[in-house]
Image: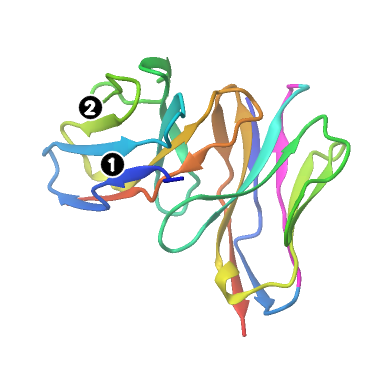
Amino acid sequence: AQKITQTQPGMFVQEKEAVTLDCTYDTSDQSYGLFWYKQPSSGEMIFLIYQGSYDEQNATEGRYSLNFQKARKSANLVISASQLGDSAMYFCAIRQGGKLIFGQGTESSVKP
Amino acid sequence: EAGVAQSPRYKIIEKRQSVAFWCNPISGHATLYWYQQILGQGPKLLIQFQNNGVVDDSQLPKDRFSAERLKGVDSTLKIQPAKLEDSAVYLCASSLAPASVETQYFGPGTRLLVL
């Protein structure tokens, strides 16, 4: 069975600084996909970034980048130049078949 | 393009009552998912539809939960009778196809409180 672990319960980051949110995963599949979602207090899950297991380059989407270390089974999210609107819960997920298996999330709060 | 629509946004009911949630996916998305998110946890899949057929309902408590997607577009999730532990956010998501590279896009969710 696939599993996602996010051990950081909460993070504080200064506005304009970078923050790294940790994610480790466990899977026996050779082909898999890793996703990061943002969930603000409004409740909607917002897709941020995707990394395929065979992608040789780390994924990037604007201020978001994914530090993918396949051998260590980690897929950390890096948010650069943090903004106040980045304050939210962040969820890492792995795709198993058609469904997503989510971690428990990490709360990130940006301070002005 | 319009995102995933869900209604109602909030619902408060008493235990043993019934409740229904509605979801309209992104136009053209063949795959629809219902997730349950209990406070402090990540979402957990309840049921996955491909067009109007069920692909995965292994974690759906079938004694009280039911879902349908009759015309392969919008979907309804029902709970009858509700229990206190059903208090959660119910998220609907859709994707073009269930392939491993397809991104799931989520709606705003329905927050259910069972008293």
Is A111 contained in the magenta span? Answer: no
Q: Tell me the quarter of the picture where residue B59 sits.
A: top left
As helix, strand or loop, the secondary structure at mark 1 comes to helix
Asked whether the beta carbons under mark 2 and mark 1 sit within 8 Å of each other, the answer is yes
User: Identity of the amino acid at label 2?
Assistant: Arg
As helix, strand or loop, the secondary structure at mark 2 comes to loop
User: Identity of the amino acid at label 1?
Assistant: Asp
- Same chain under badges 2 and 1? The reply is yes
Q: Which mark is residue B86?
A: 1
Mark 1 chain: B
Residues B73 and B8: in front is: B73
- Please state the horizontal and vertical placement of residue B28, each as a whole percent of the image: 45, 29
- The stretch in magenta equals A18-29
Q: Measuring 31% from the left and 44% from the top, which residue is drawn there?
A: B6
Residues B99 and A53: in front is: B99
In space, the residues marked 2 and 1 are separated at their CA atoms by 10 Å
- Image side of residue A5 versus residue B75, left or right: right
